[in-house]
Amino acid sequence: MAETLDQLFVLAKHALVDSTPAAWRPWVSSILSIAAMIMAFATLFALTTILERKGLGRIQNRLGPNRVGPFGLLQPLADGVKSLTKEDLVPRSADRVLHFLAPLVLVIPVFLALAVVPVGRNMVAVDLDAGILFFFAVGAATELSVFMAGWSSRNKYSVLGAMRAVSQMISYEIPLILSALPVVMITGSLSTVQIVERQAVFTGLLPSWNVLTPWGLAAFLLFLIAGTAEANRCPFDLPEGESEIIAGYYTEYSGFKFALFFLGEYIGLFAMSGLAITLFLGGWSAPLAALAFIPGYVWFFGKLLALIFLFIWVRGTLPRLRMDQLMNFAWKFMLPMSLMTILSAGAWHLMSPTPGVPLSSAEAVTHSAGGTIARWLVCGFLVAAPYILLGRYLTEGRNVGPRTYRYAD
Amino acid sequence: MTSEQGPYLFLTLLGVAALLFALTPLALAWLWARVFSPAKPGLDKNSIYECGLESKGDAWVPFRSEYYLYAIIFLVLDVETLFLMPFAVSFSGLSTGAVLAMLVFLLLLVEGLVWAWGKGVLNWK
């Protein structure tokens, strides 16, 4: 029963595809997957906009949207109608072609990037052998879009935003890719499906998720921070800081083009969170063996919503960085740390009981306790020591301490 | 779910679908504007938005040279990550000697980073 529920969508798709003539099958199969994917993530986008506004509202001690529909749940619909009927203004001096193309260049790659993220057992749109590489390759196109938008507007604020965006995104691109590498090293594959399958086994009570190792935890945090910066989200929202440069690169966008930027940004966030889940949080696998009867896609979307909640929480909590802090953080902290996670993952592999063979759950159980502790200590040391040393070095001579708040009486 | 033609049919169709997903509402908005709210462009309305002030000078200014230094370091490290990908995939089957050789490669690049750091290139001004 649980098996059928888990594979419900796969079975339904196979039944539908098999009922068509053989020549059509690849096309029907592709179109069904695409329709399911776009519908699922577009719905999630609508849901996330309302969740974000309500969540931020609660954090800022107000109610958030609550007028349209029950609990304001139909607000995304109202927003959609509004952006469809708004006038689409393009400034006189703008480069009209680039101005029109920029939102399209954002929306297409983020959907392509989502294609390699497995949302359940056998539920991945395409299982590419170089899935991770494909993800980063198409993901890099968003930088192009942001720069096109800012530059073509020919607005000083937009160009400033575009410059900030380019320097920020290329700076965080390297830590992002480097922090994904340890997982590739341990799994020995760039295929997202195999990465999840390797994590979907249980060692005793605990799952063998990559985040539950010293290198995995460090790489997960680095990936999450770099992902936030790539998605231009708070506290890394310098390219679109409303209070500094009036929404930055999309100052000159109105109507549905603005909505497309909004959509592309959120879908990009889903893709980034989806890849973080795939790499570190075990993809669609359950956290406990006893909970494995719940279908995989429920776990995937549950984890996705949890990460989205984390992003909303961070946005409501942290202030925006300054440009020099942002760049220094990327090059002087994130980059050395992500290199150290690679070393740590290497040590983790070389200290495994059977080097040369990817560690499976059965071997971990038979592995001696002393060896396990030594492995944890060495790999933990390899990430903790540079963290402490770099932290000491970078804050040296600066007046840093806990922030003190003074409230009006 | 991959079909016999490999993933490319799917990826092409997905690209087209995403394009249509973006273009359809744009076309609808254009139709709405044509029928119900024809555009009335104006000198002030279509000027660039700079908080209501008249804009002075051109926005298309050249980048500062510091950007290019970052771009060069980025390029070096980005190509490095590209080289590290195949290494990472075959890592579990490599001998200790090969891993050490890769470490030397990594150290050479780290040396470049340390050099740039020492030169003060990484200080954003």
Image (cartoon, coloured by chain):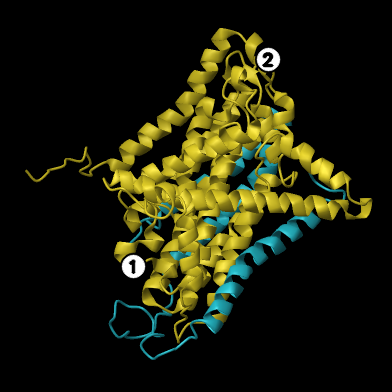
Q: Is residue A189 visible?
A: no
Q: Is residue A63 above or below residue A145?
A: above
The chain carrying label 1 is A
Q: Residue at x 85, y 52 (%)?
A: A26
- Image colour for chain A is yellow
Q: What is the x, y in percent for residue A7?
A: 73, 33
Q: What residue appears at the point 38 percent right and 91 percent down from the top-left corner?
A: B43
Residue type pointed to by label 1 = Ile
Q: Which residue is mark 1?
A: A245
Q: In the image, residue A165 lies at what x, y percent?
A: 45, 62
Instruction: Give a yes or no on whether discs 2 and 1 share a subunit.
Output: yes
Residue receiving disc 2: A363
Q: Residues within 10 Å of mark 1 (few under 14, many from 20)?
A: some
Asked whether the viewer can see residue A201, the reply is yes
Q: Nearer the viewer, residue B89 or A38?
A: A38
Quadrant of res A140: bottom right
Please name the color used to draw chain B: cyan
